[in-house]
Amino acid sequence: MDKSNSYTTFNKDSSGILSTWPLLFSTAVISTTFSSIVVNMPFLSEMMWKDGIFHAFEMGTIITVKTWLVAFSGILFGIFADKYSRRYLFVFSTFFLGLSYFINGFIPEGRGNITYILLLICQGVAGFALGARYPLLSSFINDHVAVSHRSRFFGIDMALQQFFLVVGMILSTFLFQLNKWREFFWGIGLLVSIGAIFMFFFIKEPKRGSRMEQLESVLRDETAIYDYKINKKTLRKTMLSPTNIIALIEGIFTRAALGMTIFLIVTYLQVEKNVAASSTSVFMTVFALPGAFAGNLALSRLSDYLGKKNVKNRSYLIAFSILGLVGMFSLMFFVPLPVLTADQGKNFLFLMSRREFWVIGALLFFERALQGVYGTNQSPILQIINLPEAQGKITSWNQFLETIGNGLGPLIAGVLLVISSNNFQFTAIVCILIGIPGSILWLLSLLTLTKDVNRIESILEIRAKEITENANKKPI
């Protein structure tokens, strides 16, 4: 009997991770753009208006519009992911993203509002294309990567994001200072487009449900097809299950807390303690990046091991990682840091000569490691409590609410700092209070998780029998 392309691939790569290299390549390239606008806002403002004034509102609007389009486009592509070929959707959205960055390099300098509108359009298109990525990725990985290796895949993906985000921060700042911003966007646009080409030639579309335990053996038959769609009954029984609702609500609280963390620590170091932006970037690279690798790579293996023993272990890991990361973060503001002179703030070696900054660095390392534990356990849970035809939709719902939370975090932090006259300790305590509900909700999921997993398994067992019977009825 002939096997499907996806099954042949699985025989060569039993986990399914190795054959996702085009997706991981694109993750690396795309991640270099995540901070390129934010860290270069003063430069871009001057490049557009040439008036020596920082146009904070206009620059903030670019970030907001891009973020909103990520959220709304995710809903659209979440629906598409459950109906159409993820491979072709990946190719389309990734190429479109590369094209938007490439065109960004051609906008004219110094034309004021005209330049601004063109930049806003390019970044808006980029946001729309970016919104497709996570729903497509979650749906694809659900059918391509073995359940026992899900945390490892998402750990690799998130580690690449963290590493190349820093690479993009440093590279873009360097090139922009040399007035080579056009070359930055052209280069990134070409590399992202090459990633789309790699996807077209080297990614195979897996059968839906082919990595679900109840369906895997059945769908090895070339004639067997999983062709079920979400209807009102299955939506109510599965996508609106208690654990799904808990995960969706939790995302707002946790992401708001996480959104506060990076905003507050950067503001605290640069504004309150006079640490230079360059020293802050190096500091984050030295301590935060290794923490992200530890959480996303090393601890992801532990997550898969514990998750295989009992799926509830993933809920425990998420709940305690949320408490741990907001706790570690908040402690940073109670370390008695000195107020530095301008020269001291620019001297990274001077910072490393002070014990207090090593304490901050250690806390930052563990905070980022625990953030990795949170990220690599959430997606595997959402995947096993939802049907194959709902993976894109549930991921897009989650992305939408998490994006709202991410946007609220800096806003809440800013308001609290104004109200409290820059009392960072008070604001950090509020961050803990915002994060606690997320932890409590995941502990509550322990009451519903097993029942929701069993419901999906029961539905898939019935469908496995139906698929087998339908395949046997087909003429040879």
Image (spheres, helix red, strand yellow):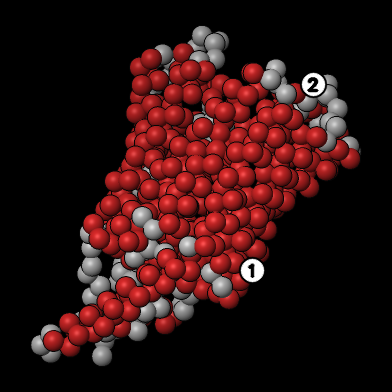
Quadrant location, the N terminus:
bottom left
Mark 2 lies on residue: 342
Q: Nearer the viewer, residue 417 or 78?
A: 417
Per the model, the C-alpha gap separating discs 2 and 1 is 44 Å
Q: Secondary structure at mark 2?
A: helix
Residue 3 in the image, given as x and y percentages of width and height? 29, 83
Q: Is residue 304 above or below residue 417?
A: below
Left or right for 375, reference 237: right
Left or right for 434, reference 474: right
Q: Quadrant of residue 100?
A: top left
Q: Is residue 243 above or below residue 119?
A: below
Q: Nearer the viewer, residue 125 or 308?
A: 308
Q: Residues within 10 Å of mark 1 (few under 14, many from 20)?
A: some
Residue 167 in sight here: no
The three-letter code of the residue at mark 2 reads: Ala
Residue 358 in the image, given as x and y percentages of width and height? 83, 43
The three-letter code of the residue at mark 1 reads: Leu
Mark 2 or mark 1: name the one nearer the start of the chain.
1
Q: Residue at x 72, y 39 (%)?
A: 330
Left or right for 95, reference 186: left
Quadrant location, the C terminus:
bottom left
Mark 1 lies on residue: 302
Q: Secondary structure at mark 1?
A: helix
Q: Nearer the viewer, residue 312 or 267?
A: 312
Q: Residue at x 51, y 47 (%)?
A: 250
Q: Which one is in front in this view, the residue at disc 2 or the one at disc 1?
A: 1
Q: Quadrant of residue 451?
A: bottom left
Q: Residue at x 35, y 17 (%)?
A: 114
Q: Residue at x 28, y 62 (%)?
A: 234
Q: Residues within 10 Å of mark 2 (few under 14, many from 20)?
A: few
